[in-house]
Image: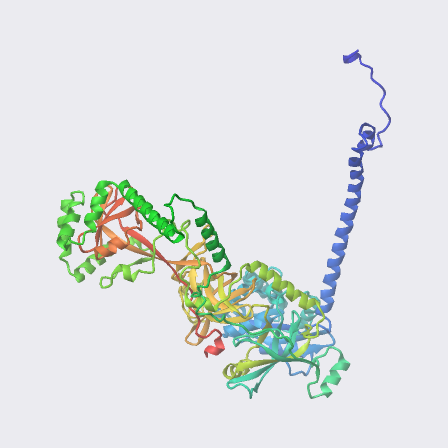
Amino acid sequence: MGGSRAQVNKPHKSRFSSKATRQQHKTSFKDRSKVTKNNVAKGARAARLQRNKMIREQKRAAVLQDKRASSGSKNPPRVIVLFGLSASVDLNPLAEDLLSLLAPGSSSSTVASSEYKLRATVLKAPYGDLQSCMEMAKVADLIAFVTSASYYIEGSTSLYIDSFGSECLSLLRSLGLPSTAVFIRDLPTDIKKRNDYKKMCISSITSEFPEDCKFYPADTKDELHKFMWLFKEQRLTVPHWRNQRPYLMSQKVDMVADNCTSGKCTLLLTGYLRARSLSVNQLVHVAGAGDFQLCKIEVLKDPVPLNPRMEQDAMDTHDVEVIQLLEPSEQEPLVVENDPDPLSGEQTWPTEADRAEADRNQKEKHLRKRALAHGTSEYQEAWEIGDTDDEDSDVDNESDGMMLDSGYTNEVDDLNNPCLSDDDQASFELINSDHETDMDSVMMDGENLTNEQKLDEIQKIKNAHADDEEFPDEVDTPMDIPARKRFAKYRGLKSFRTSSWDPQESLPQDYSRIFEFSNISRTQKHVLAKALELEQGNRDDCVASSSYLRLHVKEVPIGAASKLCELAKSMPITACGLLQHESKMSVLHFSIKMHDVSEEISDNVGTTQNSKKHDKKSHPLKGKEKLVFHVGFRQFVTRPIFSSDNFNSDKHKMERFLHAGRFSIASIYAPISFAPLPLIVLRNVEGISSFAASGSLKCIDPRRIILKKIILSGYPQRVSKLKATVRYMFHNPDDVRWFKPVDVWTKCGRRGRVKEPVGTHGAMKCIFNGVLQQHDTVCMSLYKRVYPKWPEHLFPLLDV
């Protein structure tokens, strides 16, 4: 029986068994494999936990290895850059205290301390020299910012950070800060006042530095001793872009005359190799001078060993000992520009595809069968086919002509009739102007005006429309040159976003000198993988990082080499190894933003920080202005063009100026560089470099379409519902007919088209999609593609 009278059996006592085990007797033999997967899942969880444990142990071992390597003898000396935040800070006593603490009695800036088990190089950033400060920051392992507390003690007018210090801080943040620390000097001896002034100083400037930046009092050697013990155990961080390429901070710069090449010499750079291994076959970039090849690399004995016994041996030896000598075998060629073939576009020899298409057309022609007279030859047959095709085409043309409206056909024939005189043509146009007799009389009055009167009237109208200055692309149509000639390179676009523009159309001659990659991301991945393989493999042509060596850079211009020898006295000269293809020219695009308080020259150092920001005015950078781009370790003299960055279109509008407060794209001709890399833009004003803009490398793309936009403006003379007569956009009817296919628009939002010219002085009749206001302005947008300007001198020292 069913329902509530059904028999209920006693359940099994299986509360300790799993649910899958209790239901196992109900499953078939094929489905039992699903039950075993649960057991496998338990093993997978244990394997996952074990794998995570191994990853944690590997990371811990890597951190420990980096910590030991950074403080060991195999690591190059740590570079400490002392940077004064104001003019009142004196760095000389602080540098002497640090060097005497590390190595008493040493006169060199690079010392080894057996007490701290540390090697360090102490550099002083010169106040007021922006480029030297930046070059030191590029190689610094620690930037120690130094400030003075004398502002609250002596009532000085200078703040902790003056205008130059604020400008340098903005530059260094854009460049990428390494590990940082802040030294507070000139604190009072009284303990209570000392702590109060220290807290006030920290609270005033802590927002200018990273969160992990530490503040240290640095008046006595005991305080510096405490800092050095913490610095020894600190794990230093450097920007990521510095670890992508090997670089050398030169401690000694020499030059040797080259007898083989006139005007060239061999530049000798001596220092420690950092970051990665360097191959003698690799190209190097000397900052400010350019890209060069190496003739050899000499691995020298370390002059500052950490072991005291080795240090004594080094002091006894006055001559530099060469441990290893590397000479190039398969050197990478120094290719900068492409060699264009002037006849590459004139070759008309048929390709295999052309031949195959011709054969296919010939076979199709032979397969055609037509009814021909008896005895017709192949030659006569060919003529018969041609006559038939011509007849068919004539018939098609006649039928197409019949499709036209008769009124439109007569109007076109009358307009194109060469027998009509100018007066007849003008009268014909007046007849077909929808009976606007009032406008005709006004136009005849306007035709009698001289050019000066027209310019005065146009200027009056522009002054009345002074509120529309947000349209920076407006240009005046010249009166002495026809607009169709002046704007011959411009064209109209139906839609800036969706209209097509061929990126290979009408390229300039400079594009034949550059290189382009079909897939830049794949090329960059391949280049970085090759560099990693070079780093991991123990090759005979490579020098390991942390080695002390001398680079022999060949074929350096004598003028640039002598300038480098002079600059080495005040700033470190950096040489970095280049990746594959990084010496070749292409079109580089940078995401760039103007410095907020960019000024020509900062003279007033003693003013307050807030008032200085108000006094500074942002001067926009003009397109194609001569600037110096610092891209990582490299420097380029460029003339960039600026453009907007459209995410939903393949076309980008050119900007005449780089305005403050927004990002733009700067496009230049420069050697290829693989991202990520920071960008610092310096502008030279009266021989002094000033910080102009900052950004980063965006992409390498010669096919990026940058369009310059101009707006031709006209003003309605008479409005009749949807129609209006517009004048002063053009000055002759031929220009109106030339630009007739381009749509027009108004500043109040109407859109329309040009119907026909009116009169002989450039007036035209337009039809709009709505009623036009009398005070409105009619505009026509025209576009042309623009390109960067090829630099005369690519590198700063070559320009000098």
Please provide percent x and percent y for residue 257: 56, 87
Q: Residue at x 64, y 65 (%)?
A: 530
> Viewer-proximal residue, 557 or 171?
557
Please provide percent x and percent y for residue 778: 27, 50
> Viewer-proximal residue, 246 or 343?
343
Indicate the quadrant where residue 437 lies.
Answer: top left
Q: Residue at x 77, y 36 (%)?
A: 34
Q: Judge from the rendering whether residue 254 lies leftward or rightward of residue 776; answer left or right.
A: right
> Viewer-proximal residue, 597 or 73?
73
Residue 108 is at least partly visible in this image = yes
Please provide percent x and percent y for residue 495: 38, 49
Indicate the quadrant where residue 136 lies.
Answer: bottom right
Find the residue positioned furthest to the right.
Answer: 13
Q: Judge from the rendering whether residue 56 lies leftward or rightward of residue 675; answer left or right.
A: right
Number of residue marks? 0
Find the residue positioned furthest to the front.
Answer: 375
Which color scheme is applied? rainbow
Query: Where, quadrant-wise, is the N terminus in this rendering?
Result: top right
Residue 470 is at least partly visible in this image = no
Does residue 754 lie above or below 73 as drawn? above
Please provide percent x and percent y for residue 725: 21, 48
Q: Judge from the rendering whether residue 86 lies leftward or rightward of residue 281; answer left or right.
A: left
